[in-house]
């Protein structure tokens, strides 16, 4: 005998499917990189981050979801994405090493993506997907 799902259970499943879809769409739109630290991400490693956290009444909509690595998503917590970016930009190695590390990685990945873009343009291929070896699904 099969058990029927309650309306609440159906809504939770639909929400979960939407988040999964929005995460994949955001990941592709972001060039398969974390929204905050620009680290390369795969579909498996990416998490769905709400720019405005659900705890702050943020909605699960495409405009409010970005793909982020687990570290950035966990560190951000319920902060608004602009607050989180300010913490990263103003991070000091001694006062906030975890934010400073993201800041340093942003600089490193930014330079890497810029170099990869120049090399890809010279070779006549698209980047970063070609550089990462990621195939469009």
Image (cartoon, helix red, strand yellow):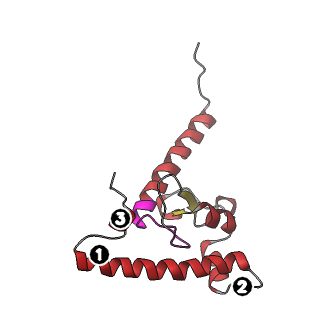
* Residues drawn in magenta: 26-39
From the viewer's perspective, tell me whether residue 3 is left or right of residue 137.
right
Q: Is residue 103 above or below residue 2?
A: below
From the viewer's perspective, tell me whether residue 33 is left or right of residue 115.
right
Classify mark 1: residues with Cα within 10 Å, few (<14), some (14-19) or many (20+).
Answer: some
Residue corresponding to mark 3: 129
Residue located farthest toward the right when viewing the structure as drawn:
95
Q: Are marks 2 and 3 in contact (CB under 8 Å)?
A: no
Residue corresponding to mark 2: 93
Q: Is residue 117 above or below residue 64?
A: below
Please, what secondary structure does the residue beneath circle 1 have?
helix
Q: Position of residue 72 (x, y in %)?
A: 62, 67
Residue located farthest toward the top when viewing the structure as drawn:
1
Classify mark 2: residues with Cα within 10 Å, few (<14), some (14-19) or many (20+).
Answer: few
User: In the rendered structure, does residue 103 fall within the stretch colored magenta?
Assistant: no
Sequence-wise first label, 2 or 3:
2
What residue is at 36 percent from the left and 77 percent from the top?
Answer: 116
Q: How far apart are labels 2 and 1 at the CA level?
A: 34 Å
Please, what secondary structure does the residue beneath circle 3 have?
helix
Residue corresponding to mark 1: 120
What residue is at 61 percent from the left and 35 percent from the top?
Answer: 9
The one of 64 and 41 positioned closer to us in this rendering? 41
């Amino acid at each position: 005998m099969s058990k029927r799902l309650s309306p609440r259970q159906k809504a939770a499943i639909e929400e979960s499917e939407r988040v999964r879809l929005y995460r994949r769409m955001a990941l592709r739109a972001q060039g398969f990189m974390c929204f905050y630290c620009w680290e390369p991400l795969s579909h498996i490693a990416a998490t769905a981050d709400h720019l405005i956290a659900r705890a702050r009444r943020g909605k699960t909509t495409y405009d409010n979801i970005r793909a982020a690595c687990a570290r950035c998503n966990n560190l951000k917590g319920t902060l608004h994405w602009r607050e989180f970016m300010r913490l990263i930009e103003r991070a000091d190695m001694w006062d906030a090493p975890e934010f400073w590390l993201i800041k340093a990685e942003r600089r490193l990945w930014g330079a890497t993506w810029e170099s990869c873009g120049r090399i890809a343009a010279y070779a006549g291929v698209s980047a970063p997907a070609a550089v990462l070896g990621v195939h469009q699904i």
